[in-house]
Amino acid sequence: METIKQRKQTAVYVYEAPLRLWHWVTVFSIITLCITGYFIGSPLPTMPGEASDHFLMGYIRFAHFTAGYIVAVGFLGRIYWAFVGNSHARELFLVPIFSGKWWKEVGHEIRWYLFLEKTPKKYIGHNPLGQLSMFCFFVVGITFMIITGFALYAEGLGRGSWADTLFGWVVPLMGQSQDLHTWHHLGMWYLIIFVMMHVYVAIREDIMSRQSLISTMIGGWRMFKDDKPD
Ligand code: HEM
Ligand code: HEM
């Protein structure tokens, strides 16, 4: 006769509410920034009538700048949370690159993602490869986009504005205004590459690694599912 196996589940509280809220606000803002940014770079075919009447590009730019402010203020808040939040709130910024053990785990994760390892490792916070890619793609990428974005914004606000004082130096550093536009535009594709990999691995890990991922970024708890009977 078949017996029902007892399945053990352990749950650990990982991501606190402000971090989770920041993640999803940033997700929606970045989607807005990519769509509106794309249209700033490649505007729609000419609209009939006076530009100031339909104000299409005006609304697109307005949405871009609003989402830009939200991402920038949110990122400052996220840095603050790295100081006051739990230890997992620091993982995004403190990558232990001097630890040999950590690099070995990165190697294991690469083999696991390439389907060369059979058993997944369990991590309470980010797995080492996730941590590395989040720093290299997201932290570096979003910092670059905020700095170049506000440097472009400074051109609109004009000489002597707060944005010009804080970010005006970026324009000559990159060459001239068109170079700044091009680098800011390229930065979008850098972030899009991250998002494609990130969403793929989040869904893949949720299915394959016997631990919760996406619901952890919604409710905060990581669930470890253990197949072995008690
Ligand atoms: C614009 C799109 C996105 C960006 C820029 C982004 C960025 C990030 C960042 C920076 C983190 C690290 C959080 C921290 O330590 O503070 C993170 C974690 C996470 N994100 Fe996203 N994310 C995006 C979209 C998504 C989507 C659509 C999903 C769901 C399918 C998702 C699922 C997750 C999960 C599950 C984690 C936690 C991973 C772990 O526990 O190691 N993200 N994301
Ligand atoms: C995820 C972050 C961001 C993405 C993906 C993004 C994307 C883009 C793209 C693709 C363009 C068009 C560049 C071109 O080809 O000329 C653009 C322009 C611009 N972005 Fe962003 N951006 C981001 C963040 C920001 C931030 C934080 C700001 C600050 C307010 C900002 C301000 C601007 C400005 C002022 C322009 C030029 C508008 C114009 O010339 O009419 N961006 N952005």
Image (cartoon, rainbow, N blue to C red):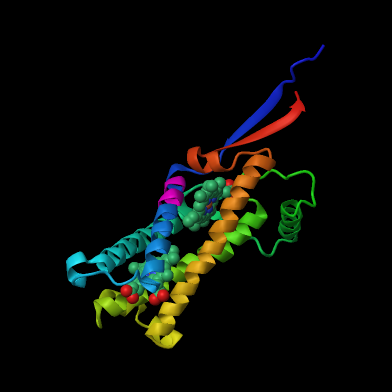
> Does residue 200 show up?
yes
Question: In the rendered view, would you say 194 is above or below 147?
Answer: above
Does 31 sit above or below residue 206? Answer: below
Instruction: Describe residue 24's horizontal placement relative to residue 224 as left or right.
Output: left
Q: Residue furthest front?
A: 48
Q: Write the start and end of the magenta stretch as one range.
A: 20-25
| Residue drawn at point x = 30 percent, y = 77 percent | 154
Left or right relative to 88: residue 45: left
Q: Residue furthest right?
A: 1
Which quadrant holds residue 103? bottom right
**Residue 131 horizontal/vertical position (percent):** 61, 56
**The N terminus - image quarter:** top right
Would you identify the image quadrant in which residue 121 lies?
top right
Q: Is residue 142 magenta?
A: no
- Left or right of 202: which side holds 155? left
**Can residue 89 be seen by looking at this rendering?**
no
Identified at 66% across, 64% down, the residue is: 97
- Image x and y of residue 22, in percent: 43, 51
Q: Quadrant of ligand 2?
A: bottom left
The kind of secondary structure the magenta stretch mainly shows is helix
Above or below, comparing residue 83 to residue 216 in the picture: below
Q: Residue at x 35, y 60 (%)?
A: 67
Measuring from the top left, give residue 80's x and y in whole percent. Answer: 43, 56
Image height check: is 137 above or below 210?
below
